[in-house]
Image: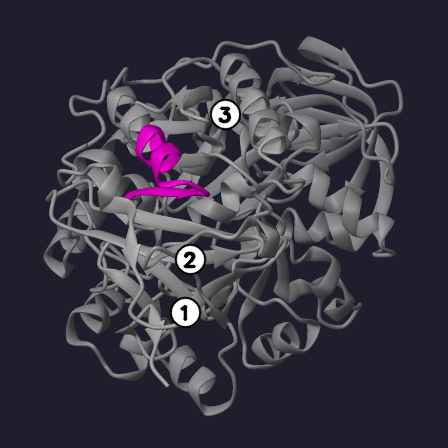
Amino acid sequence: MKIRDIVPVALGESPADVLLSNARILNVFTGRLEEGNIALFRKRIAGIGDYTEGREKIDLKGGIVLPGFIDAHLHIESSMVSPREFARAVLSRGTTTVIADPHEITNVLGIEGLEYMIKTTEGIPLNVYIALPSAVPATELETAGARLGAEDMVSLVDKYPQRIIALGEVMNYPGVLKRDRELIAKIEILRHEYKKIDGHAPGLTGKQLNAYIDAFIRSDHESTTASEALEKVSRGMQVLVREGTAAKNLEALIKAVDVQNHSFFSFCTDDRDPLDIIKEGHIDYLVRKAIRLGLDPVIAVRMATINTALHYNLRSMGAVAPGYKADMVVVNDLRDLAIETVIKDSRVVARRGSIVAPLEGVYQAPLKKGAPMSLPEFTVESFRIPARSERIRVIGMKDDDLYTDSVVLDAKVEDGVAVADPTRDLVKVAVLDRYDGTHLSKGFAQGFGIRHGAVATTIGHDSHNLCVAGVTDEDMFRAVKRVQSLKGGIAVVVDGTVKSEIALPIAGLMSDRDLDEVVEALGKLKKAVSAMGSNKDILMLLSFIQLAVIPELKLTDRGLVNVAKQRFVDLFVRE
């Protein structure tokens, strides 16, 4: 768009392409509601005022116009649908821009996976900006499908300068503090290109936090308490308030937000499954929940729009104002935030929860390579754990949190073998390397609520090896075999019978089916898990049991990991 073309529309000398009349506009700069008409030209807002001429006219009948919502940090892969089906889900909820870190698919497929995410979202009616993954692999304590080095950063930024706006979450904070040369090189490359450096520093405080921020890391989405969030804001970070499917931190963190500091808070979903998006919402859900918890609606909307745009230097987003992109959400009330209409690039794309515009893009970009599934050879006996002590280290799972405890318990031993004990909510967990076919590790976890059966999945942050949790070795074996035959996915097995499953042929992370089919299949999976005796939504929790960058105890394909010390520990505790 040329300036000389939009100015006549702003002056009222030429008609708008689209005229939105009878609007009430939330001005995120002043915090006030204004009445007026909005003149749109091509993909921009030309002006706000008493405009009357438009080639297309839409009467908003007093509806409140907000900027399109922005998700400050997420992984599209966690939606379990292809990128365009993800767009279908979130556009209907008012999200028009996302900052996506595709480190899930990149850990599996490398640059091919990253470019799949870029190309399949090019030209669709959703702004998808990319945070270039910094953690491929996330640690050296696991087997990943690829490695993204500093030299790759240079070529990718050169190839996609407009799409790549940040370095993805720097999860290896011990590597920053120890001045790991390759990690520091990645940061230096991106920051000298004036890209943001995203953080991931759970529990980091004091001098260590200072040192981490010195590496030009200016955001964090891992705070779990108000005091942690306030310390990070006080040191110059943008705190991204997260409410995903497994990690739910909004209620705790919103207490830190006030009139003086709210500019330094944004909203993100990080990992949110499609069932939650459809049932509850996306960023709109976070805004509503924050308001319900007492946050001023104007502040909540700012956190979902202009705050994030300013942090990421998205100069034409986050506000309904002249020259800004015509990405808008129309609601009838600022508190219940029921979305009537979503406008993207001056075009109505959704009405009352339904997509009304095509989601076509520039590329079809088919993925040439599916899900790696080179598992080590295994039998039922492979899942047995000979007892070498009476005491075991157990991964203590937490509800609505990615942190785990390291718990020491008495092992239940039968015929010299350590087994699951449903009476203590103690299940066996195994992780199988699906890239080299070399490693199979075993351990125990508490907190899933499973009383019988097993569930296996190829979603396992961040290297996404195949993980299975269950009560009997036989069901664990059967669940793994079923996921192997699906060539990626999730399977629930009880008493040797597959009760529910979903195939995820795109890298073992995403389905190639449409959104409605995936939502239906996921609903059946969750019911099958409930029938196993669990009253929890454990699928997302299980997918994080391998994540060896969030304390305290995790299990990768290579063994049990003490996250703080970044080293392996023995399953059995010797007195």
Q: Residues within 10 Å of mark 3 (few under 14, many from 20)?
A: many
Above or below for 162 versus 134: above
Q: Quadrant of the N terminus?
A: top left
Dot 2 or dot 1, earlier in sequence: 1
Q: Residues within 10 Å of mark 2 (few under 14, many from 20)?
A: many
Q: Residue at x 83, y 49 (%)?
A: 291
Task: Give the number of marks.
Answer: 3
Choose between 15 and 393: the one closer to the eye: 393
Residue holding disc 3: 87
What kind of residue is marked 1? Ile
Lower position in the chain sequence, tag 1 or tag 3: 3
Q: Do the CB atoms of the residues marked 3 and 2 lie less than 8 Å apart? A: no
Q: Are marks 2 and 1 in contact (CB under 8 Å)?
A: yes
User: Closer to us: mark 3 or mark 2?
Assistant: 2
Magenta part of the protein: which range?
465-479
Calculate the distance from the C-alpha at mark 2 to the C-alpha at mark 1.
8 Å
Kind of residue indicated by mark 3: Ala
Residue ID for mark 2 = 444
